Image (cartoon, rainbow, N blue to C red):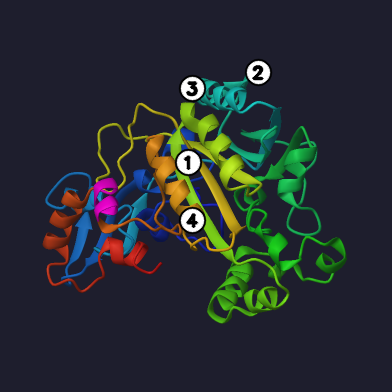
Amino acid sequence: MPLVVPQLRTITLGGAVTGLGIESPSFRNGLPHESVIEEDILTGDGQLITARPEGDHADLYTGFPNSYGSLGYSLRLKIQLERVTPYVHLRHLRFDDAGEYAQAIQDICAAGEYLGERVDFVDGTVFTARRHVLTLGSYTKSAPYTSDYTGQQIYYQSVGRRREDYLTIDDYLWRWDTDWFWCSRAFGVQDPRFRRLIPRRFLRSEVYWKVANFERRNHVVRRLDRARGKPEIEEVVQDIEVPVDKLPAFLDFFHREIGISPVWVCPLRQARKDLTWDLYKLNPEILYVNVGFWSSVDLAPGQPDDTHNRLIEAEVERLGGRKSLYSTAFYSEEEFWRLYNGEAYAMLKKRYDPNGRFADLYAKTVGRS
């Protein structure tokens, strides 16, 4: 398999490289672009360029991740792979305290093992301020049983109930896709009475994404909620990263000010210390933790519809973190280019898209908001 396989079936490797991606092996393998050996990129000025870590286009190789198609499009990727086993053994560890949770993430990722068993995958689910689950996955050649979360059973619910589990490698890679993590709640398909009537082929992120896009275009549910007197809402869809020692502070802020639950956590460390990824710089000596949350928050009367997103942006910056740009974003241009290396981006844009055929990074990721 690729060194990092994004969680949802709809995410291509090319998309995960130009727009970033993350998954549970990221504490040891970094982000998807770090496994790219070379890539063919069609640039804004019409060139077809093969970019590698060295050579004439090394600047595009290191500048392409997080460029979101504003410099060019990848047509071919040559990547590293790793061998897998038929099964993954899961252990779900529970913590009441966020500080202990963060310390366990740091210790286990540093050791690469837990209670004598190698750890190949690490991610977690935070249900409440007093209920944190850390999930450790280990390759295994055999399994006493396997669970199935592609039908009636729901994976994230099992995380909170079980101490141990086994999945086939295929089911592990797509464990979050069936219910779009937990976002399928919004479509009612977690109700077992309704779920039994839905063919398995419709229980997948691609279907939910189409329904969500229909709602964004037509606002059917929002109009009905307004007619019922429900408050206006603000969409809060983000993935952020903070250093592991700042995770308790971020979670405390998040529970207090935002209140979405559950949230997903996933540790990551830059795997290649010999390179700097210009548009998404991370300190390779630091273990970061990604926190993902995808929902909406009620607005009080008079609150603007960027209230909670701006609070998150400010807190993430205060804690020395960063956020993925697929997220709803409200940065000013000045803030944005300061955070995402505007100087390096301008040089790349001038070299590979001098006529501005593609919208720039700010216009593509924030200007739409």
* Residue ID at (33%, 37%): 282
Give the residue number, with chain letter if any, for mark 3. Answer: 110
Horizontal side of 185 relative to 283 (left or right) equals right
Q: Which residues are magenta?
A: 334-340
Horizontal side of 143 relative to 26 (left or right) equals right
* Residue ID at (37%, 54%): 17
Give the residue number, with chain letter if any, for mark 1. Answer: 82
Q: Is residue 368 above or below residue 35?
A: below
Amino acid type at circle 3 is: Ala
Check disc 1: other Cα within 10 Å, few if <14, some if 14-19, many if 20+.
few
Marks 3, 4: nearer the viewer = 4
Badge 3 or badge 4: first in the primary sequence: 3
Marks 1, 4: nearer the viewer = 4
Quarter of the figure with the C terminus = bottom left
Give the residue number, with chain letter if any, for mark 4. Answer: 307
Check disc 3: other Cα within 10 Å, few if <14, some if 14-19, many if 20+.
few
Residue 102 x/y as whole percent: 56, 27
Majority secondary structure of the magenta segment? helix
C-alpha gap between disc 3 and disc 2: 14 Å
